[in-house]
Image (cartoon, rainbow, N blue to C red):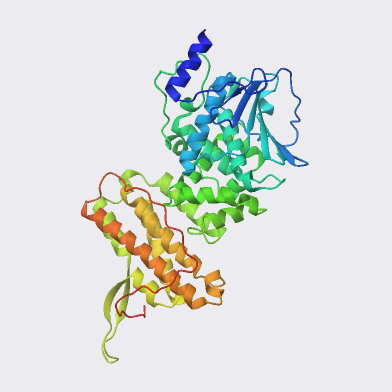
């Protein structure tokens, strides 16, 4: 009777009805049908020696991630599928994605599985696509459970366009997404039997745990996040790796098109042997090479750990420095025998009328100025600053030597299209900036809008006044 009441409370509070098992006695299927959970009738044998074992048409994966705190959860099939659906919905909301699952995830609760050897994720590619099995010990640490389900979901998303070879999902993405969802509300995602669902949920401040970890300690570099050593994932150091990964993921999502780029990266994974290639292609509007990622990550860590509220510029000072950074000082002469007169021109005029090679160092200095300002500017300006940085980085990336636009046969048409598109983006940001300035920096942050896709064959040149072209 008590278990029936618990299940009814879950249905009322979460709106997640659990269907009756379609085939196996004792199995429970989630509302979407992607998750099927059951308790194993007998112990299943697993090898704990190899972290990844490729088998014909499939794989067996032991994430080898430990957790040093948080409560243990005794798994119940009915509550487990509800938790998995909630985790999936939170992940989809973070990515701005719709539920389009293709591979079923079978959840095997195995009390005989040693905690240090689970969870195990295995997959098998068949004529109808991939299917997965996630073997879980019970009881299991709640964070380990969350990370195991997130791993299974990300692998399922990435494998939708893969063949018989499973893709490589980077460890930082799994750890960072899991830590982000945990910070949002772990207690609301992972349900336990005989625990009241009407009690006040315990919400964790999203960044406070990471800030505590990074005080007096340097964050992991992008290289260390990309290729963690086994000891970085142990119980003693795993929390620090997850904290750095959480900050890395959340900083990526702060880009105006961050969610779209993350979705694109997952979609690109099957197309490349190295996930870093997928990452650079998906985030090409922000990073031209891995060195750019390292520099951006270093600045993000400095901003997060070293700039307190007392050290930031006031809103008014932030505006003055912001607007100063968006103009380019030049000198002009009416006649050759006259002294040069100072003049300020806009970024659009530099892009529209200057040769890209001569404009690059000037716009590069603008990017550096905006990056430094971002460290100490009023928080209300961060999103707008990120918009300008993304647009300028994209222009510098698209017009660098040996870029597709630079080496194309129709070079002039490509360049004209890029000029038109970039100036249009900058003008739209200028309008947002003017509106925000009029409101004296509204406390409510402006709605985040994803940047429009850059048309590879856009044509037309931005129309501007006749301005000097010499810096």
Q: Count every numbered label the image shows and give the total.
A: 0
298 over 151 or under it: above or below: below
Tell me if I can see residue 215 in this picture: no
244 over 434 or under it: above or below: above
238 over 281 or under it: above or below: above
Q: Position of residue 29 (x, y in %)?
A: 59, 25
Residue 198, quarter of the rendered image: top left
Residue farthest along the front direction in this orientation: 22
Q: Residue at x 39, y 65 (%)?
A: 366
Tell me if I can see residue 440 in this picture: yes
Please tell me which residue lies in front, 107 or 439.
107
Residue 152 vs residue 209: left or right?
right
Q: Quadrant of the C terminus?
A: bottom left
Q: Position of residue 180 (x, y in %)?
A: 48, 37
Q: Position of residue 257 (x, y in %)?
A: 44, 52
Q: Position of residue 139 (x, y in %)?
A: 61, 19
Residue farthest along the right direction in this orientation: 56
Residue 305 vs residue 283: left or right?
left
Residue farthest along the bottom direction in this orientation: 337
């Amino acid at each position: 009777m008590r278990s029936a009441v618990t299940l009814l409370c879950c249905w009322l509070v979460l709106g997640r009805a659990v269907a009756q098992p379609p085939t196996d006695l004792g199995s429970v299927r989630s509302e979407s049908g992607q998750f099927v959970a059951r308790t194993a009738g007998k112990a299943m044998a697993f090898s704990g020696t190899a972290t990844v074992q490729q088998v014909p048409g499939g794989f067996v994966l032991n994430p080898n991630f430990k957790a040093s705190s948080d409560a243990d959860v005794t798994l119940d099939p009915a509550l487990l599928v509800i938790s998995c659906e909630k985790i999936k919905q939170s992940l989809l909301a973070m990515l701005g994605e719709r539920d389009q699952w293709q591979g079923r995830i079978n959840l095997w609760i195995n009390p005989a599985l040693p905690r240090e050897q689970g969870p195990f994720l295995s997959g098998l590619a068949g004529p109808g696509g991939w299917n997965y099995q996630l073997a879980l010990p019970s009881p299991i640490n709640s964070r380990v459970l969350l990370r195991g389900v997130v791993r299974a979901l990300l692998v399922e998303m990435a494998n939708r366009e893969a063949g018989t070879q499973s893709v490589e999902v980077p460890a930082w993405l799994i750890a960072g997404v899991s830590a982000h969802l945990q910070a949002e509300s772990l207690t609301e995602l992972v349900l336990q039997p005989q625990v009241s669902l009407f009690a006040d949920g315990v919400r964790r401040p999203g960044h406070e745990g990471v800030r505590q970890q990074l005080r007096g300690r340097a964050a992991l570099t992008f290289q260390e996040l990309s290729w963690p050593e086994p000891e970085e994932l142990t119980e003693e150091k795993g929390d620090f790796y997850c904290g750095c990964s959480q900050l890395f993921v959340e900083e990526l999502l702060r880009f105006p098109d961050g969610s779209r780029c993350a979705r694109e990266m997952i979609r690109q994974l099957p197309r490349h042997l190295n996930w870093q290639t997928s990452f650079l292609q998906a985030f090409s509007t922000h990073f031209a090479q891995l060195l750019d990622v390292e520099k951006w990550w270093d600045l993000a860590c400095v901003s997060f750990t070293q700039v307190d509220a007392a050290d930031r510029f006031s809103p008014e000072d932030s505006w003055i420095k912001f607007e100063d950074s968006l103009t380019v000082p030049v000198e002009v002469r009416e006649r050759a025998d006259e002294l040069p007169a100072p003049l300020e021109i806009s970024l659009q005029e530099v892009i529209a009328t200057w040769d890209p090679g001569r404009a690059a160092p000037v716009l590069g200095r603008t990017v550096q100025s905006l990056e430094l300002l971002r460290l100490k500017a009023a928080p209300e300006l961060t999103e707008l600053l990120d918009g300008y940085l993304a647009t300028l980085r994209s222009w510098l990336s698209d017009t660098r030597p040996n870029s597709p636009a630079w080496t194309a046969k129709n070079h002039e048409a490509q360049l004209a299209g890029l000029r038109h598109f970039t100036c249009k983006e900058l003008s739209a940001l200028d309008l947002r900036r003017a509106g925000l300035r009029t409101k004296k920096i509204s406390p409510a942050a402006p709605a985040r809008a994803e940047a429009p896709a850059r048309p590879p064959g856009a044509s037309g040149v931005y129309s501007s006044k006749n301005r000097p072209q010499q810096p």
